[in-house]
Amino acid sequence: MPLLAEPTAVQPGASEMVPRLFRLVERRQDTADTFTILLEPNDGVPLAFSPGQFTMLSAFGVGEVPISVSGDAHATGPLQHTVRDVGAVTHALSRASVGDVLGVRGPYGTGWDVGDAHGRDVVFVAGGIGLAPLRPAVLEVLSHREDFGRVVLLYGARSPEELLFVDELKQWEGQGMEVLVTVDYGRESWAGRVGLVTKLIPRAGFDPMSALALICGPEIMMRHTALALVGRGVRSSRIRVSLERNMRCGIGLCGHCQYRELFVCVDGPVLPYAQVTGLLGLREV
Amino acid sequence: MRTIEQYLPDHPFFAGLDGPTLALVAGCATNVSLAAGEYLCREGDPADQFFVVRRGRVAIEVHSPTAGTLVIDTADEGDVVGWSWLVPPYRSSFDARAAEATGVVAFDGACLRGKCEADSRLGYELMQRVTQVMNLRLEAAQVRLLDLYGAMGTTDAAAR
């Protein structure tokens, strides 16, 4: 018996609030608490998305959670999400098996819009699970590598065991991306870097005057990273961050994700740093 | 390979020091090559040196009876390792190990302290620079104390 019961089918497009049904076709455990699921639509209509957008994923009978798409936006095939098991809904999603049916609404929100960096350098800065929402943008840039200048990924994680997409990181290096990785602490056998991800910024090879920087990770990490990038000479208008808020409806109605004048689900999650510079340091917003 | 006197002006730690001051500092320095696994200093040892990494990587380590040896920081080319040479009781707080074949400029702490006492301007310049290194390390340690990628994300909102 499947873990998650299959609900009654609904008409696609009947309502923005009604999830489409997707069947889990593959599940991969990436780290101790992070997993990737691949989903095929029951109605056969693929879900088109832009890198950086998120969907509302449902574990029926448990709840819904906003998760950014981690797959390739330009490849045919299943919808991919990389999820950290940290709450009731994500725990239910982590227990789903191949064949189980999940609900998907969306895609919602703004994307990274890397096309804006054609002919220029691109700097990706990821912290922890933040690499997952950046992955579609990385894949887009690498699939049109010749359209961009230098491409750099700066990636920080808690420990070597918690690094995501380790095999792909090597592959991306081979495709012309400078990849610098650091962890908060490592065992004696870890020969890589240890320290904050901001420490990598002075070491990365990019032109700060022209670079587009895309940051995704915990908010404090993004704040420190953006400040360090500005310190190196990157214009704040050329830095984008992906905000993490309590998205519920996904369509700007419920107000759960309101961030002063912004609804993160529709105005974000990807926002220019210049637009949120003041907000990131404010309390009780 | 450039001599120490040729190398120091390009290093951010020594940026802005004039020629005579750099010569004074270089007089306390030697080039040292380490194989992977060799230690620059051990916790509790007299801190009679500090190091500027020229190539390779140095792992700053702490040993815990329960967790074993943990690497809590690394220093790469251009980074500075050690400030205990300037702070009584002049004892190393951590182990520093070459994580790979590494070249460093090693400065004799006692030699530098002596020159700093004789020349308060040099002492002030070096203290300012060491304080900057300490400040950066302290800030990084404070942010890492937050365990940004771990315990903070305990709800579905942090699932991404």
Image: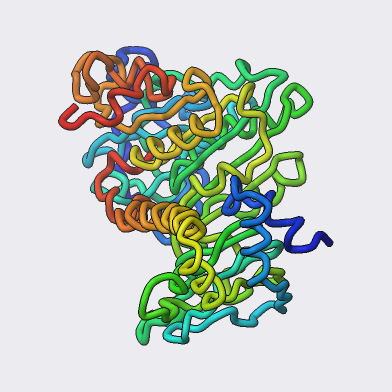
Quadrant holding the C terminus of chain A:
top left
Q: Is residue A65 above or below residue B123?
A: above
Q: What percent of the width, then of the height, locates residue A227? A: 43, 34
Q: Is residue B79 above or below residue A126?
A: below
**Residue located 59% across and 45% down the image:** B16
Q: Quadrant of residue A71?
A: top right
**Residue located 48% across and 79% down the image:** B47
Please indicate whether residue A121 sits to the left or right of residue A277 in the image: right
**Of the pair A162 and A2, the residue shown nearer to us:** A162
Q: What percent of the width, then of the height, locates residue B27? A: 67, 69
Please indicate whether residue A30 sits to the left or right of residue B108 in the image: left
**Of the pair A5 and A177, the residue shown nearer to us:** A177
**Residue located 65% across and 52% down the image:** B11
Q: Quadrant of residue B157?
A: top left
**Residue located 53% across and 69% down the image:** B115
Task: Work out whether residue A52 can be spotted.
Answer: yes
Q: What percent of the width, then of the height, locates residue B66? A: 35, 84
Please indicate whether residue A276 sits to the left or right of residue B1 in the image: left
Residue lying at the far left in this picture: please name it.
A284
Task: Work out whether residue A183 can be spotted.
Answer: no
**Of the pair A160 and B140, the residue shown nearer to us:** B140
Q: Is residue B2 above or below residue A85?
A: below
Q: What percent of the width, then of the height, locates residue A110? A: 44, 18
Residue lying at the far right in this picture: please name it.
B1
